[in-house]
C-alpha cells in the first residue's frame, strides 16, 4: 500500500478531530447507548386498486415466515470468530456494542437478517485503536474470502463503519441504513464495483472516506446522503468515473479531498463540489484534468 504523504497525515488529523466532535462522542468513550426502534413497522407505498392512486399502508418488517419474531436485544461487544458467532447474532434485533470481523479466512458471507441497530461500530477488516485512530496500512484484519455483507434491516450505527481490505467483497447490502453517528470508511475493497445498497444513508456525523477501491466505478448508492459532519475524501479509486451519487450532499463540516482518481473528470468534480457548503478547504488534484 502507498506510504502516507503530508496530505494524508493532515487528513488523519482532521478525521480524529471529526470523531471527537461527533454527537455523543468524547475522548475515550466506549460508545453504546443506541436505543432500538420502538416498533417494527415501516411505511410502504402501494396502489389503491379502485382508483389507481398511491396509498400508504403500514406493514410489519417481520418476514412472512416469522424468522425475526423471536429476535431481541443483545448486549456488549461481539467479535465473530466462527460460525457459532454468526448463529448467535442471527437472533439479535439490536446490539449495544461493537460488531467486529477481523482476520477470518473461513468466512464468505455475513448475513444478519434481524439486526436493526448497532450501538457501537461495525468493523470489518480494520478497527480504530482505543484512542480512536486508524492505521490504514494495517492489513492484518483482512477477511480475504468475504464476498457479501447483508444486513437488510439495519437502520443506524452508533459509532463508525469501517469496511476494509475486502479482496473478494462484491456486495455491501445495507438498504435501510439511514444514519451513522461516527464515520464511514471504505478502504481497499478491490472487488467492490458499486454502493447501490447504501441508498437510504442520509447523514454521517464525522467523516466519509472512500479510498483505494480499485474496481469502484460510481457512488450512485450515496444519492440519499445530505450531510457529513467532518471530512469527505475520495482518493485513489482507479476506475471511478462518476460522483453523481454525491449530488445531494449539502454540507461538509470540514475539508473535501478528491485526489488521485485517474478516471474522474475534473470538470465533473467541479460541478459536484461546487454545490456543497464546505466548512474548510477543497483539494482537487491527480484526477483527469483533460476533460
Image (cartoon, helix red, strand yellow):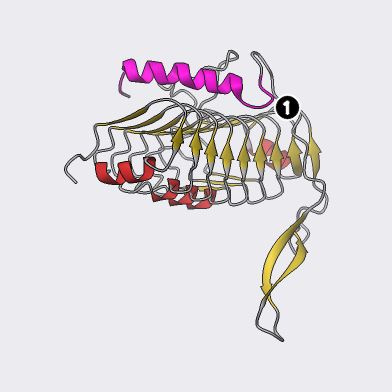
Q: Quadrant of residue 118?
A: top right
Where residue 230 appears, as percent x and y from the top left, is 51, 28
Nearest the viewer among 92 and 234 is 234
Name the residue rendered at 76%, 56% in the picture.
67
Q: Is residue 278 magenta?
A: no
79 lies left or right of 73: left
Name the residue rendered at 53%, 49% in the picture.
224
202 lies left or right of 248: right
239 lies left or right of 91: left
Where residue 193 appears, as percent x and y from the top left, is 39, 48
Q: Quadrant of the N terminus?
A: top left
Where residue 191 appears, as percent x and y from the top left, is 38, 44
Nearest the viewer among 146 and 82 is 146
Q: Is residue 161 above or below residue 27?
A: below
Residue that carries the numbered disc 1 in the rendered image: 32
Nearest the viewer among 153 and 20 is 20
Amino acid at each position: 500500500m502507498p506510504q502516507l504523504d503530508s496530505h494524508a497525515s493532515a487528513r488523519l488529523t482532521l478525521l480524529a478531530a471529526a470523531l471527537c466532535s461527533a454527537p455523543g462522542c468524547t475522548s475515550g468513550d466506549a460508545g453504546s447507548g443506541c436505543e432500538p426502534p420502538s416498533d417494527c413497522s415501516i411505511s410502504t407505498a402501494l396502489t389503491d386498486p379502485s382508483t389507481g392512486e398511491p396509498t400508504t399502508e403500514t406493514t410489519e418488517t417481520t418476514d412472512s415466515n416469522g424468522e425475526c419474531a423471536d429476535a431481541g436485544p443483545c448486549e456488549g461487544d461481539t467479535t465473530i470468530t466462527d460460525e457459532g458467532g454468526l448463529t448467535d447474532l442471527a437472533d439479535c434485533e439490536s446490539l449495544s456494542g461493537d460488531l467486529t470481523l477481523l482476520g477470518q479466512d473461513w468466512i464468505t458471507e455475513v448475513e444478519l437478517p434481524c439486526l436493526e441497530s448497532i450501538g457501537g461500530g461495525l468493523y470489518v477488516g480494520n478497527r480504530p485503536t482505543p484512542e480512536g485512530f486508524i492505521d490504514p496500512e494495517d492489513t492484518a484484519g483482512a477477511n480475504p474470502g468475504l464476498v457479501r455483507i447483508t444486513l437488510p434491516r439495519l437502520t443506524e450505527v452508533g459509532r463508525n463503519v469501517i469496511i476494509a481490505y475486502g479482496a473478494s467483497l462484491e456486495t455491501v447490502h445495507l438498504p435501510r441504513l439511514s444514519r451513522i453517528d461516527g464515520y464511514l470508511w471504505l478502504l481497499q475493497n478491490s472487488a467492490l464495483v458499486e454502493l447501490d445498497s447504501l441508498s437510504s444513508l442520509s447523514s454521517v456525523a464525522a467523516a466519509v472516506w472512500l479510498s483505494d477501491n480499485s474496481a469502484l466505478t460510481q457512488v450512485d448508492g450515496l444519492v440519499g446522503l445530505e450531510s457529513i459532519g467532518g471530512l469527505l475524501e475520495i482518493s485513489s479509486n482507479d476506475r471511478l468515473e462518476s460522483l453523481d451519487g454525491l449530488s445531494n450532499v449539502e454540507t461538509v463540516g470540514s475539508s473535501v479531498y478528491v485526489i488521485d482518481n485517474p478516471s474522474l473528470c475534473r470538470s465533473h468534480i467541479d460541478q459536484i463540489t461546487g454545490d456543497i457548503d464546505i466548512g474548510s478547504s477543497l483539494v482537487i488534484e491527480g484526477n483527469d484534468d483533460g476533460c
